[in-house]
Amino acid sequence: MTSPLSQRNGTRITPPQSRTDATPPIESPASTPCATPPATGTILAIDDSRTSLSVLGQRLGQLDYRTALSDNGSEGLDLIAARGFDLVLLDMVMPGMSGLQVLHEIRSNADTADLPVIMMTGHRDPAAAIDGLAAGADDHVAKPLDFDVLAARIARVLARARRITELKRANAALDARVATRAVELGETRATLAATQAERKRLAASVKALNDRIQWLSRTSVSR
């Protein structure tokens, strides 16, 4: 049967799979179950190797992640623009648009600048990992992939992203409260200023009335 990844656009959506399914390792002899607790989220994997993409979709599905798979960077960017993802797994070396170019586009877009990205780099190319991190990647994993390591790093990056999101929401709520308080203080100051002006006006009226009474009193006595 023809794999969905062999279709022209090279993309498919993989729902979470049962963890009882047997799946091959990702370019690695290790095939032991991942010890990382199951989590939820939607992950986009971009890799020109359709075999790696297929296995990634299966293994991530076992951890209850939903996955979208793309075999080229340009299409991956289109998917990112069209729908929301919690994390992107991005191969460093791809024909056409490289992983670094894709990462640059992600970080240059205000809508995706904070999107978590894990780079997949060559095992014998530590300089590539440094380049990826310097370009704004949140983490990296070396190929051939050790899925236990990959799953642990995905969980860590997603947890950090959730904490950052919660912090931003808390800061936004705090800013809103501060703004509301500032408005209230402004209204209070305006009310106080109006009250003080009214007191001065009344005091001036009372003084004028007293002066008038004293003048009338002096006038009556002189008569």
Image (spheres, helix red, strand yellow):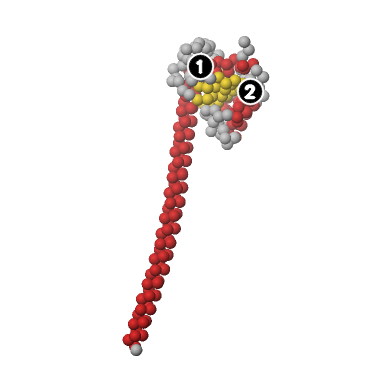
Q: Is residue 28 left or right of residue 194?
A: right
Q: What numbered label is drawn on residue 72?
A: 2
Residue under numbered circle 1: 17
Q: Is residue 119 visible?
A: no
- How far across and down, in percent of the image, does residue 129 sit? 55, 25
Q: Is residue 15 above or below residue 101?
A: above
Label 1 vs label 2, nearer the camera: 1
Res 68 quadrant in image = top right
Mark nearer the N terminus (1 vs 2): 1
Question: Is the C terminus in the top left, top right, bottom left or bottom right quadrant?
Answer: bottom left
Question: Is the N terminus in the top left, top right, bottom left or bottom right quadrant?
Answer: top right
Q: Is residue 195 above or below residue 26?
A: below
Secondary structure of the residue carrying numbered label 1: loop
The amino acid on which the numbered mark 2 sits, given as a three-letter code, is Asn
User: Which of 160/190 is in front?
Assistant: 190
Dot 2 alpha-carbon crowd within 10 angstroms: few under 14, some 14 to 19, many 20 or more:
many
Identified at 39% across, 75% down, the residue is: 208
Between the C-alphas of marks 1 and 2, the distance is: 24 Å
The number of numbered badges drawn on the structure is 2
Return the residue found at the far left: 221
Q: Are marks 1 and 2 in contact (CB under 8 Å)?
A: no
Dot 1 alpha-carbon crowd within 10 angstroms: few under 14, some 14 to 19, many 20 or more:
some
Identified at 67% across, 24% down, the residue is: 96
Identified at 42% across, 55% down, the residue is: 188
Res 37 quadrant in image = top left
Q: Is residue 223 visible?
A: yes
- How far across and down, in percent of the image, does residue 177 sit? 44, 45
Q: Is residue 200 left or right of residue 52?
A: left
Return the residue found at the far bottom: 223
Secondary structure of the residue carrying numbered label 2: loop
Identified at 39% across, 68% down, the residue is: 202
The amino acid on which the numbered mark 1 sits, given as a three-letter code, is Gln
